Image: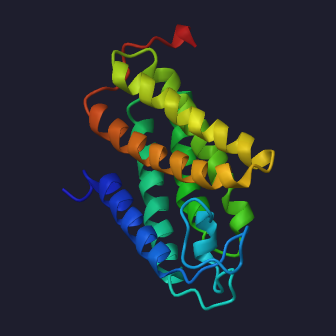
């Protein structure tokens, strides 16, 4: 039973712990070091992983954030490994499987001093979701088609806003793409339980 719902369990626990970490965050943001508490529209989630908050106080929420990311890394990793078994084309299935194993390690690094290396997981997750989306678009799962496209757009919007230093909007979009990605993962887990994409012929690729 736990194995069957492992992705759901990991994602729910991760979100709960991240919220607890945010509620325990003393304060400070990139825009205002003297701000109080964690602002969902003023802080990046990565601020929760530092020993010291940006206002200089001890970050009491750090341990919850780290454990939360550990659960999230397992959740995403198992999800991609599960999806790799539902795709009939071996080459794409293997890529998803490798992304899954890599993300179990890399996503957790985001919560460590090796944060920059861990951000590679964002690119891998985007690649994995893009591959899955390409198969979903050829299936009869019409609701998921829309959800996949919208989720990918939130990633691209974040990269654009962050890249051009629109930080106030980037703070918000980070939460949007994180939430949309988790929701999409849970939807894919649920709706594709009996869908192996066997009807998609390799010649289409």
> Relative to residue 21, is residue 191 drawn left or right?
left
Q: Residue furthest top?
A: 203
Q: How is the image coloured?
A: rainbow
**Quarter assignment of residue 199:** top left
Residue occupying image coordinates x 25% and y 51%: 4
User: Residue 201's x, y, as percent?
Assistant: 46, 11
User: Residue 123's x, y, as percent?
Assistant: 66, 45
Residue occupying image coordinates x 54% and y 9%: 204
User: Residue 102's x, y, as percent?
Assistant: 59, 54
Label total for image = 0
Classify 136 as above or below 102: above
Residue 37, visible in the rendered structure: yes
Q: Nearer the viewer, residue 79 or 27?
A: 27
Residue occupying image coordinates x 50% and y 67%: 69
User: Considering the image in quadrants, where does the N terminus appear?
Assistant: bottom left
Classify 203 as above or below 93: above
Q: Residue furthest right?
A: 164
Classify 128 as above or below 142: below
User: Residue 141's x, y, as percent?
Assistant: 34, 21
Q: Nearer the viewer, residue 15 or 23?
A: 23
> Relative to residue 13, is residue 102 drawn left or right?
right
> Relative to residue 30, is residue 5 drawn left or right?
left
């Amino acid at each position: 039973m736990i194995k069957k719902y492992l992705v759901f369990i990991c994602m729910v626990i991760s979100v709960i712990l991240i919220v607890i970490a945010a509620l325990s965050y003393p304060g400070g943001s990139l825009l205002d070091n003297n701000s109080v508490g964690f602002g969902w529209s003023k802080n990046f989630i990565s601020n929760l992983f530092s020993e010291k908050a940006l206002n200089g106080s001890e970050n009491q929420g750090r341990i919850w954030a780290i454990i939360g990311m550990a659960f999230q890394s397992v959740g995403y990793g198992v999800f991609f490994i599960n999806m790799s078994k539902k795709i009939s084309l071996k080459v794409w299935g293997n890529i998803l499987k490798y992304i899954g194993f890599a993300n179990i390690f890399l996503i957790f690094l985001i919560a460590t001093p090796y944060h920059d290396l861990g951000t590679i997981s964002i690119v891998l997750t985007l690649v994995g979701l893009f591959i899955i989306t390409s198969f979903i678009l050829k299936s009869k799962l019409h609701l998921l088609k829309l959800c996949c496209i919208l989720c990918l757009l939130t990633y691209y919007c974040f990269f654009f806003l962050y890249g051009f230093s629109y930080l106030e909007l980037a703070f918000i979009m980070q939460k949007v793409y994180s939430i949309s990605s988790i929701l999409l993962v849970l939807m894919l887990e649920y709706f594709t339980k009996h869908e192996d994409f066997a009807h998609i012929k390799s010649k289409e690729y």
